């Protein structure tokens, strides 16, 4: 027993992965728990409106930095310190320019967008502010993650969750602001930790004004293909919410959104372990080990993470099926949607095992084509069948994610044969 415990403790990937998973789950999971607690104060129709607002914030997040945030992790392992600083500086300048463009566009289209989304104009401006500062909040967490500063990552990550939690409870329950209170809490946290992130990067001298066109060009060309890739997620969940809102009721939007949030628990676990998994993959690929040693290490890592995903998915499915009807009977019908969606979530977790190779070797265009075309297929099927049943929509999620997994795995196998053989 002692030998087995020592083996587990000495497994850096498993230990760090568990810690990062725990902190990330606290950060994102408390937000889900918060929605459960606030469900007694937010009706399903209001929940649907909050969901539509979050969809807008997510959509803006894809464009506010041109999806270049993820390049921080790649640059950290592939570039020298000076080049890394230039890359980070370029990533931090882009949100400023893009936010100005968003503001100009909103000035001319605010009434139209407000009617289309059922979101008041004021909250459209709030969405822009949140998306801007969330970039720097995310960059701070990414920096701590690649530097493997687990404790500092945990403090910041949990701090975001706790402040969000307390503020939301106060504004929604004590102040009676309903879904708008949750938005205000999100705004306050995004601004505070976004400013903190900017301050940390400046204090560590990771920001420079001596930027070249080549740096911007390289960073932007890496990020732009990921906009359709990330927008594929929005096309699925965001457009589905809009389609449901048109074909069904706002309450149906709330129930389906709740099922998607349950599904996101599994995805959160997958993303959390992938935070460490990706770092280990990048370290291994950039090391001086032989290709055979790299393949053996990466294969063992994938098998370990795969087993974790299976166990996590099963536990979440069982836990949600038992607890939601007891704690939140108003949302109990969403469990039927969730049980189908959980299969899609598991497939997405498996996808995380392969996509890191495409990021590292700059195959972003390949990934973009796979995910975006599958999202178009998903959207087309949803436009045709969602009006008949939301259960069909859940099956569409699973089918489209399976297609993504098959083709991404195929691309990854090509890379391994080319680069590691």
Image (spheres, grey):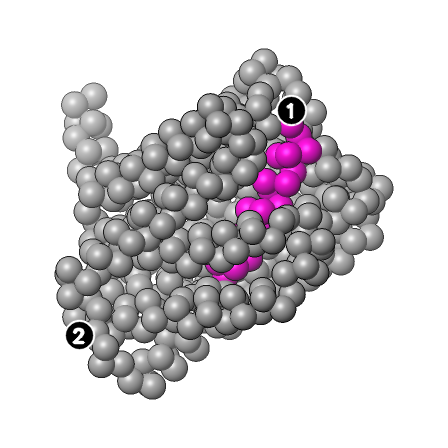
Q: Give the residue pinned by disc 2.
A: 82
Instruction: Out of 402 and 248, give the one closest to the viewer.
Output: 248
Question: Residue at point 60% right, 53% down?
Answer: 121
Question: Residue at point 76% right, 58% down?
Answer: 380
Q: Is residue 392 left or right of residue 131?
A: right
Instruction: Out of 240 and 73, give the one closest to the viewer.
Output: 240
Residue lying farthest to the bottom in this orientation: 213
Would you identify the image quadrant in which residue 74 lies? bottom left
- Where is 198 relative to 30, above or below? below
Q: Main secondary structure of the magenta part?
A: helix
| Mark 1 surroundings: few (<14), some (14-19) or many (≥20) residues within 10 A | some
Residue lying farthest to the top in this orientation: 326
User: What kind of element bears circle 1?
Assistant: helix
Would you identify the image quadrant in which residue 361 lies? bottom left
Q: Give the residue pinned by disc 1.
A: 331
Q: Which residues are magenta?
A: 43-62
Instruction: Out of 340 and 49, give the one closest to the viewer.
Output: 49
């Amino acid at each position: 027993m002692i030998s087995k415990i020592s083996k587990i403790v000495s497994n850096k990937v498993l230990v760090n992965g568990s810690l990062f998973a725990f902190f990330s789950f606290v950060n994102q999971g408390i937000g889900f728990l918060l929605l459960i607690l606030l469900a007694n104060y937010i009706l399903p129709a209001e929940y649907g409106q909050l969901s539509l607002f979050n969809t807008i914030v997510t959509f803006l997040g894809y464009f506010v930095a041109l999806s270049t945030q993820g390049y921080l992790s790649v640059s950290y392992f592939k570039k020298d310190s000076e080049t890394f600083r230039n890359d980070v500086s370029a990533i931090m300048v882009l949100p400023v320019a893009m936010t100005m463009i968003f503001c100009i566009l909103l000035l001319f289209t605010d009434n139209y967008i407000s009617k289309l989304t059922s979101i008041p104009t004021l909250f459209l401006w709030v969405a822009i502010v949140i998306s801007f500062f969330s970039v720097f909040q995310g960059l701070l967490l990414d920096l701590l993650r690649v530097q493997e500063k687990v404790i500092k990552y945990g403090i910041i990550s949990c701090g975001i969750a706790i402040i969000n939690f307390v503020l939301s409870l106060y504004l929604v329950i004590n102040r009676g602001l309903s879904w708008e209170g949750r938005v205000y809490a999100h705004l306050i946290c995004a601004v505070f930790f976004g400013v903190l992130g900017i301050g940390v990067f400046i204090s560590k001298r990771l920001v420079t004004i001596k930027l070249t066109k080549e740096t911007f060009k390289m960073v932007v060309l890496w990020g732009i293909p990921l906009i359709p890739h990330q927008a594929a997620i929005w096309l699925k969940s965001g457009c589905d919410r809009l389609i449901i809102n048109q074909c069904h009721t706002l309450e149906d939007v709330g129930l389906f959104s709740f099922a998607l949030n349950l599904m996101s628990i599994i995805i959160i676990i997958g993303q959390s372990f992938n935070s460490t998994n990706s770092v280990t993959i990048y370290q291994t690929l950039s090391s001086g080990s032989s290709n055979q040693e790299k393949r053996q290490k990466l294969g063992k890592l994938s098998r370990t993470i795969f087993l974790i995903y299976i166990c996590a998915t099963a536990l979440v499915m069982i836990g949600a099926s038992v607890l939601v009807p007891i704690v939140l009977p108003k949302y109990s019908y969403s469990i039927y949607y969730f049980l189908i969606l959980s299969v899609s979530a598991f497939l997405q977790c498996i996808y995380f095992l392969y996509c890191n190779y495409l990021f590292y070797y700059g195959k972003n265009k390949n990934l973009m084509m796979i995910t975006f075309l599958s999202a178009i297929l998903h959207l087309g099927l949803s436009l045709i069948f969602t009006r008949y049943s939301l259960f069909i929509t859940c099956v569409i999620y699973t089918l489209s994610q399976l297609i993504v997994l098959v083709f991404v795995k195929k691309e990854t196998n090509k890379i391994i044969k080319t680069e590691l053989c």
